[in-house]
């Protein structure tokens, strides 16, 4: 069985920043001993998205916001159905 290393988000973000600054994936995998598949995943996960208001979010934050939005939409639908059930119809 292979060895599994667990890296914290700060380490991952630092490598993504180095990649954004011009280091290649090959250089980073060699220097830091991480797999190229893990590093590629981190680049997708921690790459930044700039919004119209100049706010910067990582892909991970966008994904979290999408999940939160889906939950809120579901709760809103449930509340609308409850209102329809309990509102007297004349």
Image: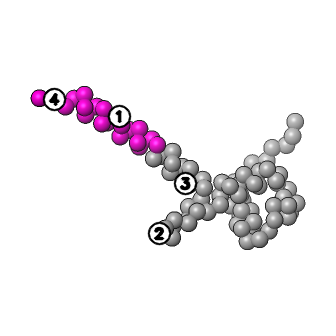
For the C terminus, the image quarter is top left
Give the mark nearest the N terminus, 4 or 3: 3
Task: Determine whether label 2 and label 1 are within 8 Å by CB.
Answer: no
Residue located farthest toward the front when viewing the structure as drawn: 90
Q: Residue at x 30, y 32 (%)?
A: 81
Question: Disc 4 to disc 3, how far (Cα)?
Answer: 41 Å
Q: Position of residue 78 (x, y in %)?
A: 35, 34
For the N terminus, the image quarter is top right
Nearer to us in this view, 41 or 31: 41
Q: Residue at x 74, y 62 (%)?
A: 15
Q: Which residue is mark 2?
A: 53
Question: Disc 2 to disc 3, how far (Cα)?
Answer: 15 Å
Give the mark nearest the N terminus, 1 or 4: 1
Query: Majority secondary structure of the magenta segment?
Result: helix
Residue 81 included in the magenta stretch of the image: yes
Q: Which residue is mark 4?
A: 88
Q: Position of residue 33 (x, y in %)?
A: 85, 56
Q: Is residue 59 visible?
A: yes
Q: Where is 89 relative to 34, above or below? A: above
Residues in magenta, as a range: 70-90
């Amino acid at each position: 069985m292979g060895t599994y290393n667990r890296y914290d988000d700060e380490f991952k973000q630092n490598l993504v920043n180095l990649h954004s600054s011009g280091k290649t994936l090959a250089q980073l995998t060699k220097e830091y001993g991480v797999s190229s598949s893990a590093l590629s995943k981190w680049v997708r996960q921690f790459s930044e998205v700039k919004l119209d208001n100049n706010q910067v979010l990582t892909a991970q934050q966008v994904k979290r916001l999408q999940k939160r939005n889906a939950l809120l939409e579901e709760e809103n639908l449930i509340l609308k159905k409850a209102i329809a059930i309990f509102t007297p119809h004349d």
